[in-house]
């Protein structure tokens, strides 16, 4: 173990050289300007807020280079135990010439001066410290520092890897050397990591999924490992303590499902695909409601289809997380079985219950009726919306059949009207040689979805569980997603924060992969749960993860998504597949502080028609106009621009210390938190930690509206 720590310690020295001494090329260090009012007798003077004592600062303070400019400076950094930020490099930057978030000077608040730690390869712990000091709290610094530092690291990883990936694609890529998980030649046993045959914390390793890509793409992946290693090694050197805690950083790529991470492990999976794990799907999409509707008629006994369908349903459930809501409907000539009358939040426990329920059902009995199954799916959505058991975000019906059934034009119209009412996308799957393709394809095409023609013997699990890629396309996730799950190797419970990365080398940005960092690397969440700030921590990470994401489902983008599946999935055979699609204007954003007249934040309008707020949900004319004006992105009011931006469209990260939990600002919160408890403001007594919250007023109104609409539609 001592040898391993010595090798790992060498990473610290390498980490210091990671950043350019003059900052990132996309955010170079500059000479400060605008501090003249703080010059006294030719000397820069700093006066702490509320103090009458001033301190002399160097004339080159913060200028032109990445340097620990605050080391040894009074009053905060001159003691024997200074804050961590005192010894971290930073510099002043130009806000208009910086691709990172530039922070306004706190020490010199009257100056037009901005600084950045990230351009010097560091997290901005000074901003966290100064915010906590201003709040005068003792518990907030611990939790906000943890949240913001992890977020800063994720953003730094994303910024670095995306740009390096584009640079690599521009050249001729030959195979690169990398450290392999299987076998891990330098791994050794460690009592802190008992579930593995060995670890090597001095390296970042990879498991490249065999047989999934071409030789050229394999070469690309081998070089991508090196890019990931450069970034992760630096972070591990600063934050990792493998002799004390189990915690990981990891990246999975969208192209092949390969896995890269720190530390290197002796790990040889046989049937593992990270793209279909909750952390990956959750990290690349926003919250969603999913109804899985599966044919269990007698014909499903042929070609082992019923087993394939059961496995595929399990795989879809594996892509869902605590922020998502779902249920399963099995149908034949009627409703054969239904897991729950309303959707349920897909916690670890609930997912396990649903998957065990699947095993107890009869999967091959009776005839086929599409209409009764789809109408029950929409009735389930209707009941769930009325009861508040919904993410209040995107909704999808996943419909699988191997048979044929009568479906009239009036039935198509009813489904389309319900799809519009509930903002629901239909994914349809025709399994086997005898399956209807005409009805299922039309259902997908008329309801903004994708049709899949699945021959017998296909990998149905991968095909069906790939539905989430639809929600990962046409949007850019700007904040991390948080989850918690048991380490598959038995190492305890992990608490990762995950952020998607995008391949911006293409005409349309597409999902490159997902990068994650476990909180466990920095703190032991099991110990944190006993602290007074835990409820605050839980509320904050739940808040940010539950924000609905605006989705671009323009016809242009749908055509490209369908064509990527195959010619059978293209809806219009006469129209050509566009070479590229426009994107939403990145400068068109919601006002994140805005709460509408009924108490809702902007993102809850995703999928709803804001122009009908008055007639549908009883908003005043002024309230409707306020939502349209302040919630432009969520209301779909953004201009589309072409070509899409080649750089990140997110202006920067919102610091967790900046705002309080949503449940403290409004009672219109839905669903559960990351621990499966009802969402409440920290410090508020909970009457039932497992129950979903009561339906909110707009949900109830929508439910009442939906009941009337559905009654008319279904006759």
Image (cartoon, rainbow, N blue to C red):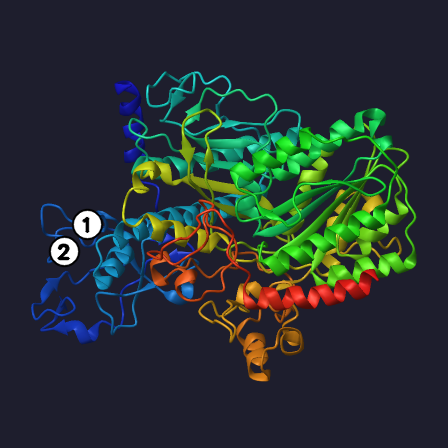
The 10 Å Cα crowd at callout 2, few under 14, some 14 to 19, many 20 or more, is some
Q: Position of residue 170 (x, y in %)?
A: 58, 44
Position of 485 with respect to 379 (left or right) is: left
Among the two numbered marks 1 and 2 on one chain, the one whose residue lies closer to the N terminus: 2
Position of 113 with respect to 426 (left or right) is: left
The 10 Å Cα crowd at callout 1, few under 14, some 14 to 19, many 20 or more, is some
Q: Quadrant of residue 328?
A: top right
The residue located at (88%, 53%) in the rendering is 573
The residue located at (41%, 48%) in the rendering is 156
Q: Mark yes or no: residue 587 visible.
A: yes
The residue located at (50%, 26%) in the rendering is 177
Residue bearing the label numbered 2:
76
Q: Residue furthest bottom?
A: 621
User: Which mark identifies residue 83?
Assistant: 1
User: Which mark identifies residue 483?
Assistant: none
Q: CA distance from mark 1 to mark 2?
A: 8 Å
Q: Position of residue 368 (x, y in %)?
A: 87, 40
SS state under label 1: loop
- From what the image shows, is residue 336 above or below residue 608? above
Q: Residue furthest left?
A: 53
SS state under label 2: loop
- Circles 1 and 2, Cβ within 8 Å, touching? The answer is yes
Q: Quadrant of residue 90?
A: bottom left
């Amino acid at each position: 173990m001592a040898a391993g720590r010595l090798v790992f310690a060498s990473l610290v020295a390498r980490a210091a050289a990671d950043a350019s001494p003059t900052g990132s090329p996309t955010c170079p260090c500059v000479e400060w300007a605008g501090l003249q009012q703080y010059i006294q007798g030719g000397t820069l003077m700093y006066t702490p807020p509320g103090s009458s004592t001033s301190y002399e600062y160097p004339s080159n303070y913060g200028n032109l280079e990445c340097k620990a400019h605050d080391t040894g400076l009074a009053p905060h950094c001159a003691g024997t135990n200074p804050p961590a930020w005192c010894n971290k490099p930073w510099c002043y930057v130009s806000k208009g010439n910086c691709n990172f978030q530039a922070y306004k000077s706190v020490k010199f608040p009257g100056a037009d001066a901005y600084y950045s730690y990230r351009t010097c390869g560091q997290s901005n712990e000074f901003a966290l410290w100064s915010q906590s000091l201003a709040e005068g709290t003792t518990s907030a610094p611990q939790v906000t520092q943890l949240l913001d530092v992890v977020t800063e690291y994720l953003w730094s990883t994303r910024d670095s890897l995306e740009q390096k990936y584009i640079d690599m694609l521009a050249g001729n890529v030959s195979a690169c050397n990398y450290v392999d998980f299987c076998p891990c030649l330098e791994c050794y046993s460690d009592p802190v990591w008992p579930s593995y045959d060995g670890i090597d914390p001095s390296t970042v390793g990879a498991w490249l999924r065999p047989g999934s890509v071409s030789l050229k793409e394999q070469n690309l992946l081998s070089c991508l490992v090196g890019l990931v290693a450069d970034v992760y090694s630096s972070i591990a050197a600063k934050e990792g303590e493998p002799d004390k805690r189990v915690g990981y950083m990891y990246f999975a790529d969208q192209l092949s499902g390969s896995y890269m991470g720190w530390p290197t492990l002796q790990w040889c999976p046989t049937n593992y695909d990270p793209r279909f794990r909750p952390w990956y799907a959750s990290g690349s999409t926003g919250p969603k409601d999913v109804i899985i509707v599966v044919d269990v008629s007698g014909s499903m006994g042929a070609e082992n289809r019923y087993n394939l369908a059961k496995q595929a349903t399990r795989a879809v459930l594996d892509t869902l997380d605590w922020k998502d809501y779902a249920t399963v409907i099995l149908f034949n000539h009627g409703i054969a079985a239904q897991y729950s009358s309303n959707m349920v939040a897909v916690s670890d426990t609930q997912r396990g219950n649903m998957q065990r329920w699947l095993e107890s059902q009869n999967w091959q009995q009776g005839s086929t009726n599409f209409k009764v199954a789809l109408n029950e799916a929409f009735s389930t959505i209707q009941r769930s919306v009325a009861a508040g058991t919904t993410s209040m975000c995107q909704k999808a019906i996943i419909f699988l059949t191997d048979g044929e059934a009568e479906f009239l034009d009036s039935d198509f119209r009813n489904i389309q009207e319900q799809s519009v009412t509930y903002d629901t996308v239909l994914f349809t799957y025709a399994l086997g040689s005898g399956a209807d393709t005409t009805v299922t394809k039309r259902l997908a095409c008329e309801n903004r979805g994708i049709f899949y023609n699945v021959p017998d013997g296909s990998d149905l699990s991968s095909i069906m569980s790939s539905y989430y890629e639809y929600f990962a396309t046409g949007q850019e996730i700007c904040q991390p997603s948080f989850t918690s799950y048991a380490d598959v190797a038995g190492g305890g419970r992990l608490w990762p924060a995950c952020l998607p990365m995008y391949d911006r080398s293409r005409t349309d940005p597409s999902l490159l992969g997902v990068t994650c960092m476990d909180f466990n690397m920095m703190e032991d969440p099991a110990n944190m749960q006993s602290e007074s700030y835990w409820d605050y921590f839980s509320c904050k990470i739940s808040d940010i993860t539950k924000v609905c994401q605006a989705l671009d489902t323009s016809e242009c983008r749908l055509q490209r998504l369908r064509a990527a599946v195959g010619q059978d999935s293209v809806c219009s055979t006469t129209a050509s597949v566009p070479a590229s699609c426009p994107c939403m204007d990145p400068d068109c954003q919601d006002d994140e502080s805005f709460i509408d007249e009924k108490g809702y934040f902007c993102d809850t309008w995703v999928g709803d028609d804001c122009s009908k707020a008055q007639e549908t949900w009883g908003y005043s004319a002024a309230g409707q106009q306020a939502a349209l004006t302040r919630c432009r992105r969520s209301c779909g009011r953004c201009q589309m621009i072409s070509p899409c931006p080649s750089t990140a469209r997110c202006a920067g990260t919102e610091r967790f210390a900046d705002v309080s939990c949503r449940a403290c600002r409004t009672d219109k919160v839905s669903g559960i938190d990351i621990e499966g408890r009802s969402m409440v403001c920290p410090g508020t007594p909970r009457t039932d930690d497992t129950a979903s919250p009561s339906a909110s007023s707009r949900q109830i109104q929508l439910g009442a509206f939906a009941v009337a609409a559905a009654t008319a539609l279904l006759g």
